[in-house]
């Protein structure tokens, strides 16, 4: 573990939790975005700290020296790769000294207003859990595009029913009251959807009050043909998403017929997708974001689930190449 610069400074307002694994270039961009957001939040350079946990990859210890004069930074180096984001995020939570915790993946970025906008309801005492909107991009962005018409957005109003059906919140859009003193943590048995599981735990176990800020304040990168848990989880059948969904549905049972109906619908969709993956079909890059838009409209309008609609999300799935194509 690197030297802890927090011993010489006051308690920060926000700790930004960043797990990382062998993505030095995008991690540097993520830290730049934290620094810019911190400056918008406060003139106090110590108001925001970044807690970076390296999940057993190439050392990032040099970041302390690189960033120590620009951004309060703690780096923790794990001895081995845990295989997911839960363990490094939990390590970071234990180290987080801020009154609030923000989350950021090492390949995403905050927009400059993110922390200022997100912390305001927390500082007023109006909420314990704040999230804002995110733009979903298939190419690297370093600023908000002037025209968002060609992008998908994750900017859905809070609906507890919707949250029990699908994870419509972008991890990098969320700021919460620090919960390190509680037993709630990311579930280490999950290597995908662990963030969704935590949002449910915070809002049901800790009863965190949720506020949605309807402003785009972060960028969620979904760049095709890059390594990552989301892309990798769509290459095997049964997919990790299908298994994680089954696990979370069992962990958080509900007696709401609307939630139960749409949970059954999403399970059926996962099985449909797994069948295509097993036949070597390549999944569309932003498939889940398209499904979220559909689910939000249906659930918010109290429309019943329609299993006949599942196939429409896969009409663009390319046919396999090679022997599979003639079976």
Image (spheres, rainbow, N blue to C red):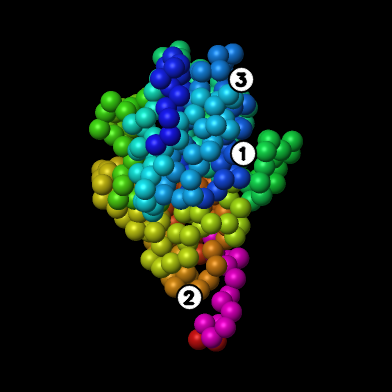
**Sequence order check: which comes first, mark 3 or mark 1?**
1
Residue 257 % position (x, y): 31, 46
Residue 155 % position (x, y): 55, 36
Q: Which mark is residue 83?
A: none
Q: Total label count?
A: 3
Residue at the spot 60% in from the left edge and 71% down from the top edge: 318
Up-down relation of residue 268 to residue 162 (above or below): below
The residue labelled by disc 1 is 29
The kind of secondary structure element at disc 1 is helix
Residue 75 % position (x, y): 45, 35
Residue 188 % position (x, y): 31, 47
Q: Which mark is residue 279?
A: 2
Q: Are marks 1 and 2 in contact (CB under 8 Å)?
A: no
Residue at the spot 54% in from the left edge and 63% down from the top edge: 283
Q: Are marks 2 and 3 in contact (CB under 8 Å)?
A: no
CA gap between label 1 and label 2 equals 38 Å
Is residue 294 something one can see in this rendering? no
**Sequence order check: which comes first, mark 1 or mark 2?**
1
CA gap between label 2 and label 3 equals 49 Å
**Sequence order check: which comes first, mark 2 or mark 3?**
3
Q: Which mark is residue 40?
A: 3
> In terms of image quadrants, where is residue 265?
bottom left
Residue at the spot 33% in from the left edge and 27% down from the top edge: 179
Front-most of 137 and 21? 21
The mark lying in front, picked from 2 and 3, is: 3
Residue at the spot 31% in from the left edge and 37% down from the top edge: 185
The kind of secondary structure element at disc 3 is helix
Q: Which residues are magenta?
A: 312-325
């Amino acid at each position: 573990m690197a030297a802890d610069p927090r011993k010489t400074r006051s308690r920060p307002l926000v700790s930004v939790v960043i797990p990382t694994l062998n993505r030095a270039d995008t991690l540097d961009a993520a830290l730049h975005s934290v620094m810019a957001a911190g400056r918008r939040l406060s003139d106090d350079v110590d108001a925001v700290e970044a807690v970076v946990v390296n999940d057993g990859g190439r050392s990032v210890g040099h970041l302390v020296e690189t960033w120590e004069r620009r951004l309060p930074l703690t780096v923790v180096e794990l001895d081995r790769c845990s295989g997911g984001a839960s363990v490094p995020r939990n390590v970071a939570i234990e180290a987080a000294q801020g009154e609030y915790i923000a989350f950021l993946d090492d390949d995403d970025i905050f927009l400059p207003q993110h922390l200022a906008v997100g912390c305001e309801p927390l500082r007023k005492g109006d909420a314990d859990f704040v999230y804002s909107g995110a733009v979903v991009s298939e190419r690297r962005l370093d600023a908000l595009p002037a025209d968002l018409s060609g992008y998908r957005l994750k900017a859905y109003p809070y609906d507890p029913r919707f949250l029990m059906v699908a994870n419509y919140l972008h991890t990098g859009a969320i700021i919460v009251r620090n919960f390190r003193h509680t037993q709630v943590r990311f579930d280490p048995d999950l290597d995908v959807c662990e963030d969704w599981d935590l949002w449910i735990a915070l809002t049901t176990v800790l009863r965190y009050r949720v506020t949605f800020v309807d402003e785009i304040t972060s960028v969620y990168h979904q760049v095709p043909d890059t390594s990552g848990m989301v892309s990798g989880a769509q290459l095997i059948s049964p997919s990790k998403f299908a298994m994680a969904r089954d696990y979370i549905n069992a962990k958080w049972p509900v007696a709401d017929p609307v939630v139960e109906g749409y949970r059954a619908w999403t399970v059926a969709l996962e099985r449909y997708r797994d069948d295509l993956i097993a036949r070597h079909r390549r999944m569309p890059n932003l498939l889940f974001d398209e499904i979220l838009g559909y689910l939000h409209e249906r659930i918010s309008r109290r429309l019943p689930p329609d299993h006949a609609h599942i196939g429409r999300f896969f009409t663009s799935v390319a046919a396999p190449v090679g022997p599979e194509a003639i079976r």
